Image (cartoon, helix red, strand yellow):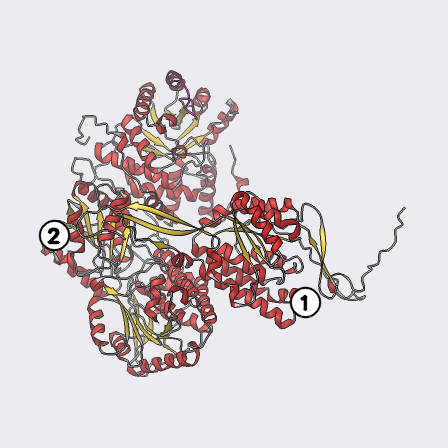
């Protein structure tokens, strides 16, 4: 028997003449769709104000579609300034008359209830999240929904323990919080906003993103069922103008925003001179650094996690890869082999690794950056996997031959596109990693403990992952340096944004 | 044949590539989340069947037991058309002759354990003689054990030499090298042992004897598959993989196939390069195949034990 | 020579305060009060019992009089369970404590009746049970937060990453307060297991009924067997065992007897046990719950790791 048995198809060889491994041929996985039959979705959703679903003043509705099929899922109410005013009044009323006066232990129990109810309906939420946003069912089911439920559970426990979190102080709530969240982790972002606000005794007016309103509206149904007093949480849907109406409303005490740096700056300007407290969680262009003494296969897996899962729609995505030159060829080979096994397709198929891009505009943005990258002289490589004919999809892409000054290495793409650079020394990579106006996250891969801590102390980023990536937990504070925003969400530090300490 | 340098490069085994356990386990768990259904499931199950080394390695084995095992190997489920046979039967050297007679001229290979299986605690000449005997009796494949004590004491050259010596004693037979991963304790050590075995001449690397817990697991098999992949890319040579022990359910076996598919790719997806060391797995696979055909969950009562 | 005489109960009312059944009334199946060890409900190996009574002198039930051998078995169960329980994610422990609250809430009525039998008024009983449930929720919330309050990152002068974390001390033997049947038990158990320890509790000698009901609640709450073990019996017989057992890491006494306190502290010295004395604590008040009860049963571990300093600027935490 010859040592190498191969049917020579059009497989290219490696640099030392060894034929590449063959993925994407041979055994194929049959479709394994998650069942949709048990979920309950209405055809039309109204605004959730003061404990009830009410029609929008303008009578206008917009559509939310499934980005994998481009089909309409439901009609969503469009809130205008009058609706925002109604919501804020309801929140103010609830705060002054009920929520502020309620003993903290009782407040906690409402939030515990919400957490448990999300757990009970976890699968329904996961399916709706995938249909509405394009995120794979595996991510919704295993990451988004459990983290969201856990976030409520964690903060519920803080409600009657605040004096321990701030030694020497007796903190008090702020009042009404206006919260605007993005489309990349719809339910999770709602949890990150609502849970700490309620636990610390505030009431909420929340606007979900216009392309992903459904899980927030289903959350409104749970909130109704939990018996939470009317007006404590209000969920109003709309576009950017609705968000601006919230930011500009005079009777709001606190604004919390997660989204692009561009809009974050607009909001920061808009609240200048008012007494509104503000926290911002904005964009990023994180450096993921592989040293030559890293466990390479696991580092590659971490890089893949960092940029391709959730379709790269992650503010803390590891979109800039720095590889120490001595291991560059091996890492690149491993990366390319690994991308070949990623499956792009129907988000509801349990085997899909990379789902649909959230919207047509986002896909256009990503494609724009891909052509910019090519024009700038970087070398593009994409996996050869098939993608569906309909819907918004993008293959996992990487650019090599990238310089620090390329636009693809500087600007946030928010898609499955990785820019790869090499480095030689520790000083060089530290400098390059920090050489960005962003500062949300960073990743370090090395087996040497003291080197890990050298890097982690020097990264100018709010979250540093060592030998892992994209890990989240309700107890772990998350937030940025520099233009990635200020304020922290999660953990003990996540409380101060909603309190007068 | 691809152009591969003939110069033999033996690395310093004291500095083998690092393996991060948490990272391995994360990747391993992704394989278990793949959902294999319908045609791909049936295709996968048949492939699993064809990759089984049907095994009996007990102190109380008799010629009668081995004859029954061989019959079962040839007649997995006569009522189901189009089933493959298993890849091999795996027995002690003293039973190889019986197996050879029972299997006749079927395609099923005879694998024999050797080298003072399972402990490997014997003098070198005893182990070589054990191997020669098994091959002489008709074994097509030899499953050897490495000296774990020597390995853990850091005597990597000793382990390299013993594998090379057994490979020589095998002659035409293919050599599978059992690392006994359950005794090696860390993934770094498993990687190191895998590299030693491949450089020393193994045709297959194998996780376990099945006599020690833990036996094969998905994470440890992933470490070994990654070692095989790196070896392939630096030498052009393919090495086979055999996880053994603890795989008795079809669902688990399919997860192993997913892992193989996504780490090494199409060329390894056949029984020349991948085996399952198992005994009760075959019946579970047969039950699943019948369930896929009839749509009805099966009972063990309907499938002959041997 | 014994004659077969039809035995008539000598009591003026029958056991457990039930009315004597009339000709058409359904006879209730009476509860047997056993102890709770390793997730099972065995009887005491000594076979002994005592009769629980209330202030009116009514006999309530036959209660197991636990022996030192029961305690020994309970310690073995608690030790076996410790490894798994302390390794659980803090969040998981929180979810389990919350589940205990869910189960207790569902059984409120049963506990109210038992408390009334043991001399509570109805309103006192309701207050005690709701306080116990809320207290469990309180500690469920602490499971993944006390580490953030009591753990620290220490800014040492040398180039090292240095951090201190609380870790559970191990197996805790505790004697619950005498005066409260339920809230004393819950107030003792919750902080112990929230902190990742396992425990053996000796229930109130005079008001033992709720102890076994609570064991049943725990048993139906995803709490692994052996994490909580509950014995009934006399502190005077057992406190010395609690304090001297060499495989117990900490002992807690909720009571005011100074002689017991002194002797426990002396015996505990045998293996340098941590001794917690909680006297004059009104478990029915706010003072009955605090994260410091969790901290009492934690060890503090400090770890050092060097930090390379390459790339300019100062490195350090």
Of residues B225 and A330, the one drawn nearer to the viewer in this rendering: A330
* Residue A10 shows in the view: no
Q: Which mark is residue A403?
A: 2
SS class of the residue under badge 1?
A: loop
Q: Is residue C236 left or right of residue A313?
A: right
Graded by Cα atoms within 10 Å as few (under 14), some (14 to 19) or many (20 or more), the crowding at tag 2 reads: some
Q: Is residue B165 left or right of residue C200?
A: left
Of residues C74 and A432, the one drawn nearer to the viewer in this rendering: C74
**Mark 1 touching mark 2, by CB under 8 A?**
no
C-alpha distance separating marks 1 and 2: 81 Å
SS class of the residue under badge 2?
A: loop
A279, above or below A33, in the image: below
Q: Which mark is residue C43?
A: none
Q: Is residue B96 left or right of residue A315?
A: right
| Quadrant for the C terminus of chain A in the image | bottom left
Q: Is residue A407 left or right of residue B76?
A: left
Helix, strand or loop: magenta stretch: loop
B124 falls in the magenta region? yes
| Quadrant for the N terminus of chain A in the image | top left
Determine which quarter of the picture holds residue B251: top left
Query: Measured from the top left, where is residue A109 in percent x and y?
Result: 47, 68
Query: Measured from the top left, where is residue A55 in percent x and y?
Result: 36, 81
Of residues B119 and C182, the one drawn nearer to the viewer in this rendering: C182
A450 falls in the magenta region? no
Of residues B43 and C98, the one drawn nearer to the viewer in this rendering: C98
**Chain of the residue where label 2 is placed in the rendered structure:** A
* Closer to viewer: mark 1 or mark 2: 1
Q: Which residues are magenta?
A: B115-126
Query: Measured from the top left, where is residue C269 in percent x and y?
Result: 54, 45
A46, above or below A123, in the image: below
Q: Which mark is residue C119?
A: 1
**Chain of the residue where label 1 is placed in the rendered structure:** C
């Amino acid at each position: 028997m010859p040592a190498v048995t191969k049917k020579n198809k059009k497989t290219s060889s490696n640099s030392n003449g060894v034929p590449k491994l063959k993925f994407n041929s041979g055994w194929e996985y049959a479709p394994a769709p998650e069942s949709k039959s048990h979920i309950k979705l209405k055809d039309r959703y109204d605004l959730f104000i003061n404990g009830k679903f009410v029609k929008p003043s303008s009578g206008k509705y917009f559509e939310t579609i499934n980005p994998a099929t481009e089909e309409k899922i439901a009609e969503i109410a469009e809130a205008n300034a009058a609706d925002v005013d109604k919501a804020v009044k309801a929140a103010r009323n609830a705060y002054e008359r009920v929520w502020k006066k309620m003993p903290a232990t009782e407040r906690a129990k409402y939030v515990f209830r919400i957490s448990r109810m999300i757990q009970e309906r976890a699968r329904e939420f996961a399916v709706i999240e995938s249909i509405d946003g394009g995120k794979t069912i595996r991510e919704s089911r295993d990451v988004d929904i459990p983290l969201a439920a856990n976030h409520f559970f964690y903060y519920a426990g803080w409600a009657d323990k605040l004096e321990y979190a701030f030694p020497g102080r007796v903190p008090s709530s702020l009042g009404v919080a206006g919260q605007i969240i993005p489309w990349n982790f719809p339910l999770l972002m709602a949890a990150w906003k609502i849970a700490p606000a309620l636990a610390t005794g505030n009431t909420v007016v929340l606007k979900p993103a216009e392309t992903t309103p459904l899980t927030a509206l289903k959350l409104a149904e749970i909130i109704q069922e939990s018996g939470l007093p009317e007006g404590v949480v209000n969920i109003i849907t709309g576009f950017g103008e609705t968000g601006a109406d919230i930011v500009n409303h005079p009777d709001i005490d606190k604004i919390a925003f997660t989204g692009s740096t561009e809009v974050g700056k607009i909001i920061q300007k808009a609240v200048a001179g008012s007494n509104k407290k503000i926290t911002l969680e904005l964009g990023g262009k994180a450096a993921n650094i592989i040293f030559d003494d890293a466990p390479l296969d696991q580092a590659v897996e971490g890089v893949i996690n960092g940029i391709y899962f959730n379709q790269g729609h992650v503010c803390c995505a590891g979109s800039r890869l720095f590889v120490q030159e001595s291991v560059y060829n091996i890492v690149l080979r491993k990366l390319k082999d690994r991308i070949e096994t990623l499956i792009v397709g129907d988000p509801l198929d349990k085997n899909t690794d990379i789902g649909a891009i959230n919207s047509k505009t986002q896909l256009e943005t990503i494609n724009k950056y891909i052509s910019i990258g090519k024009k700038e002289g970087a070398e593009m490589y994409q996996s050869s996997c098939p993608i569906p004919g309909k819907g918004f999809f993008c293959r996992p892409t990487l650019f090599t031959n990238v310089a620090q000054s390329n636009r693809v290495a500087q600007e946030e793409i928010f898609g499955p596109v990785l820019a790869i650079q090499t480095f030689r020394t520790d000083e060089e990579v530290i400098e390059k990693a920090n050489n960005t106006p962003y500062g949300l996250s960073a990743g370090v891969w090395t087996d040497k403990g003291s080197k890990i801590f050298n890097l982690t102390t020097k990264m100018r980023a709010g979250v540093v992952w060592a030998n892992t990536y994209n890990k989240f937990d309700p107890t772990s504070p998350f937030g940025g340096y520099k233009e990635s925003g200020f304020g922290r969400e999660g953990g003990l530090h996540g409380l101060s944004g909603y309190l007068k300490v | 044949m691809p152009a591969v340098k003939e110069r033999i490069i033996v690395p310093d085994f004291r500095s083998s590539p690092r393996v991060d356990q948490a990272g391995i386990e994360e990747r391993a768990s992704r394989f278990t989340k793949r959902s294999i259904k319908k045609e791909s499931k049936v295709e996968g199950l048949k492939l699993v069947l064809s990759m089984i080394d049907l095994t009996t390695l007990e102190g109380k084995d008799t010629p009668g037991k081995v004859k029954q095992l061989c019959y079962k190997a040839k007649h997995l489920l006569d009522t189901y058309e189009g089933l493959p046979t298993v890849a091999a039967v795996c027995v002690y050297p003293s039973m190889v002759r019986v197996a050879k007679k029972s299997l006749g001229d079927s395609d099923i290979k005879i694998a024999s354990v050797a080298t003072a299986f399972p402990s490997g605690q014997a003098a070198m000449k005893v182990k070589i003689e054990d191997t020669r005997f098994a091959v002489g009796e008709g074994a097509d494949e030899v499953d050897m054990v490495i000296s774990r004590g020597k390995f853990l004491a850091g005597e990597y050259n000793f382990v390299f030499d013993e594998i090379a010596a057994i490979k020589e004693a095998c002659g035409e037979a293919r050599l599978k090298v059992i690392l006994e991963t359950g005794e090696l304790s860390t993934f770094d050590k498993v990687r190191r042992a895998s590299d030693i075995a491949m450089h020393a001449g193994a045709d297959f690397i194998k996780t376990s004897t099945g006599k020690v817990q833990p036996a094969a697991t998905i994470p440890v098999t992933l470490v070994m598959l990654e070692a095989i992949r790196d070896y392939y890319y630096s030498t052009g040579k393919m090495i086979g993989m055999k996880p053994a022990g603890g795989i008795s359910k079809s669902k688990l076996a399919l997860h192993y196939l997913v892992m193989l598919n996504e780490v090494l790719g199409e060329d390894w997806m056949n029984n020349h390069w991948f085996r399952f060391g198992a005994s009760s797995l075959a019946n579970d696979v047969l039950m699943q195949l019948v369930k896929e055909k009839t749509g009805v969950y099966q009972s063990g009562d309907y499938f002959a034990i041997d | 020579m014994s004659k077969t005489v039809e035995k008539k109960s000598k009591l003026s009312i029958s056991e457990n305060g039930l009315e004597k059944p009339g000709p058409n009334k359904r006879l209730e199946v009476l509860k047997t009060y056993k102890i709770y060890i390793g997730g099972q409900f065995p009887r005491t190996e000594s076979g002994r019992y005592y009769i629980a009574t209330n202030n009116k002198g009514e006999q309530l039930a036959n209660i197991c009089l636990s022996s030192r051998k029961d305690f020994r078995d309970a310690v073995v169960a608690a030790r076996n369970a410790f490894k798994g329980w302390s390794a659980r994610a803090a969040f998981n422990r929180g979810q389990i404590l919350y589940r205990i609250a869910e189960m207790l809430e569902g059984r409120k009525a049963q506990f109210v009746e038992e408390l009334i039998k043991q001399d509570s008024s109805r309103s006192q009983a309701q207050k005690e049970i709701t306080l116990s449930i809320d207290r469990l929720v309180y500690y469920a919330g602490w499971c993944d937060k006390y580490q953030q309050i009591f753990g620290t990152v220490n800014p040492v002068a040398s180039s090292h990453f240095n951090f201190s974390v609380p870790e559970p001390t191990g197996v805790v033997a505790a004697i619950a307060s005498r005066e409260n049947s339920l809230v004393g038990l819950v107030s003792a158990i919750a902080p112990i297991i929230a902190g990742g320890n396992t425990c053996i509790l000796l229930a109130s000698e005079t008001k033992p009924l709720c102890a076994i009901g609570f064991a049943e609640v725990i048993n139906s709450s995803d709490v692994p067997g052996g994490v909580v073990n509950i014995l009934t019996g006399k502190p005077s017989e057992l406190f010395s065992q609690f304090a001297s057992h060499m495989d117990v890491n900490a002992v807690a006494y909720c009571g005011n007897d100074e002689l017991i306190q002194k002797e426990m502290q002396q015996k505990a010295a045998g293996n340098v046990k941590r001794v917690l004395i909680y006297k004059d604590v009104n478990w029915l008040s706010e003072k009955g719950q605090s994260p410091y009860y969790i901290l009492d049963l934690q060890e503090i571990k400090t770890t050092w790791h060097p930090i390379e300093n390459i790339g300019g600027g100062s490195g350090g935490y």
